Image (cartoon, rainbow, N blue to C red):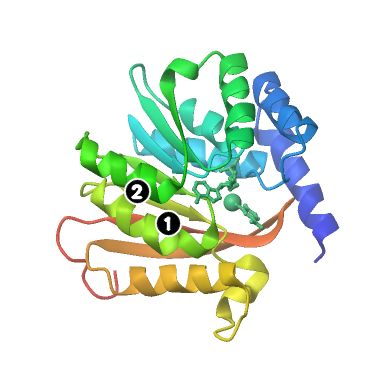
C-alpha cells in the first residue's frame, strides 16, 4: 500500500461521508495561503474529533496546539449552545490566522484562544479553577506531550476523554534509541500513561492523506484503572 492509495481513500471517504463544507474549506485555504505548515488534521480526522466530542456530549473542550484553527473548528461545531473550546497556541502568527478563521466561521464567541506557551496557559487554567473539561485534544510540540497530559489530568474529571495526535510518527515510536525529540517525547508520554492509574488508554495507528501516524485515546477513570482494561 502506498501514500497515493491512502490519499485516494481519504478523498473517497471525504466525498462520500463528509458533506461539502465551505467554511472548513475556506479555513484550510487560509492556512495554506498564510504559509502555515500543512500539519492540520485531515478532514476525516477532523470529523472523528467532531464525532467523539458529540458522543461525549462535550460542553467544555480544551485543545493544545491551535495552528490555523482547523481542528478547533471541527471541535467547536460539536458544541451545544453555551459550550466553549479553549485552544492554546504559542505562535502569534498561527493564532492570527486561527482568529480570522473563527471570525469567518461566525463562532468566535464559542472559542477562547490563548496565546503563549501551552504549559503556562495550562497552569493558568489550573489556577482559574474552572469547571473540568469534557474532552481534551493534545496536538502541540511533541516533546512536551507528557507535560501537557499531566496538566490536562488536573483539568479533567472522571469521564473526561483525552485524545493525543501523532503518537506513531511513521512507526518511529517503537525505536527506543531514536534521536528525534518528538519520538522521545511521545515515548515519555506513553511511559507516563502506562503508570498513571487514573486513566485507561489505547492508541490506534492511522494511514491517510497525511501519511502513517496515530491517535492515543484516553479515558479518565474515577478509580484507579484495573489491569487489562
Ligand atoms: N491542532 C491543529 C494542528 C496543530 S500543529 C490542527 O489539527 O488543525 C501544532 C501547533 O502547536 C503549532 O501551531 C505550533 O505553533 C503549536 N505549538 C508548538 N509549541 C507550542 C507550545 N509550547 N505551546 C503552545 N503551542 C505550541
Ligand atoms: C507535526 C505536528 C503535527 O501536529 C502533525 O499532525 C504532524 C506533524 C510535526 O511537527 O511534524
Ligand atoms: Mg497533529
User: Does dot 1 land on a helix, a strand or a loop?
Assistant: strand
In the displayed structure, 76 sits above or below 123; it is: above
Q: Position of residue 19 (x, y in %)?
A: 66, 26
| Residues under numbered marks 2 and 1 in contact, where contact means CB atoms less than 8 Å apart | yes
The reply to whether residue 119 is in sight is yes
Disc 1 Cβ-to-ligand 3 distance below 8 Å? no
- Left or right: 42 as drawn, with respect to 168: right
Q: Which residue is mark 2?
A: 161
First-in-chain label (2 vs 1): 2
Residue at the farthest right position: 4
Question: Going 75% across and 32% down the picture, which residue do you hit?
Answer: 34
Asked if residue 192 is positioned above or below residue 75 in the image, the reply reads below
Identify the residue at image location x=28%, y=53%: 153
Query: Which part of the image, by quadrant, shows the C terminus?
Result: bottom left
Would you name the residue on which mark 1 appears? 217
Binning the other alpha carbons within 10 Å of mark 2 as few (below 14), some (14 to 19) or many (20 upward) gives: many
At numbered mark 2, what does the secondary structure look like: helix, strand or loop?
strand
Is residue 68 visible to the viewer in this orientation of the structure? no
Disc 2 beta carbon < 8 A from ligand 1?
A: no
Q: Could you say which quadrant of the image residue 3 lies in?
A: bottom right
Please name the residue shown 53% across and 51% down the image: 140
Residue 89: image x %, image y %?
Answer: 51, 40
Which image quadrant: the N terminus? bottom right
Place residue 196 in its image quadrant.
Answer: bottom left
| Image point (73%, 27%), residue name | 30
The Cα–Cα distance between marks 2 and 1, rounded to whole angstroms, is 7 Å
Q: Position of residue 55 (x, y in %)?
A: 39, 37
Report the front residue among 91 and 134: 91
Amino acid at each position: 500500500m502506498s501514500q497515493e492509495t491512502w490519499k485516494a481513500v481519504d478523498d473517497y471517504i471525504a466525498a462520500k461521508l463528509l458533506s461539502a463544507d465551505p467554511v472548513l474549506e475556506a479555513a484550510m485555504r487560509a492556512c495554506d495561503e498564510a504559509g502555515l505548515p500543512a500539519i492540520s488534521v485531515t478532514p476525516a480526522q477532523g470529523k472523528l474529533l467532531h464525532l467523539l466530542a458529540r458522543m461525549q456530549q462535550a460542553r467544555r473542550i480544551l485543545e493544545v496546539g491551535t495552528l490555523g484553527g482547523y481542528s478547533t473548528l471541527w471541535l467547536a461545531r460539536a458544541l451545544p449552545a453555551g459550550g466553549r473550546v479553549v485552544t492554546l497556541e504559542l505562535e502569534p502568527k498561527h493564532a492570527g490566522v486561527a482568529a480570522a478563521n473563527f471570525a469567518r466561521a461566525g463562532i468566535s464567541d464559542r472559542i477562547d484562544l490563548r496565546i503563549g506557551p501551552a504549559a503556562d496557559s495550562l497552569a493558568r487554567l489550573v489556577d482559574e479553577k474552572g469547571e473540568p473539561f469534557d474532552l481534551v485534544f493534545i496536538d502541540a510540540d511533541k516533546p512536551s506531550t507528557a507535560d501537557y497530559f499531566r496538566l490536562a489530568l488536573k483539568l479533567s474529571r472522571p469521564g473526561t476523554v483525552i485524545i493525543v495526535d501523532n503518537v506513531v510518527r511513521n512507526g518511529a515510536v517503537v525505536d527506543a534509541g531514536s534521536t528525534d525529540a518528538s519520538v522521545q517525547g511521545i515515548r515519555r508520554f506513553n511511559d507516563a500513561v502506562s503508570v498513571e492509574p487514573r486513566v485507561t488508554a489505547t492508541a490506534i495507528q492511522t494511514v491517510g492523506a497525511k501519511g502513517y501516524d496515530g491517535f492515543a485515546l484516553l479515558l479518565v477513570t474515577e478509580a484507579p484503572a484495573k489491569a487489562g482494561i
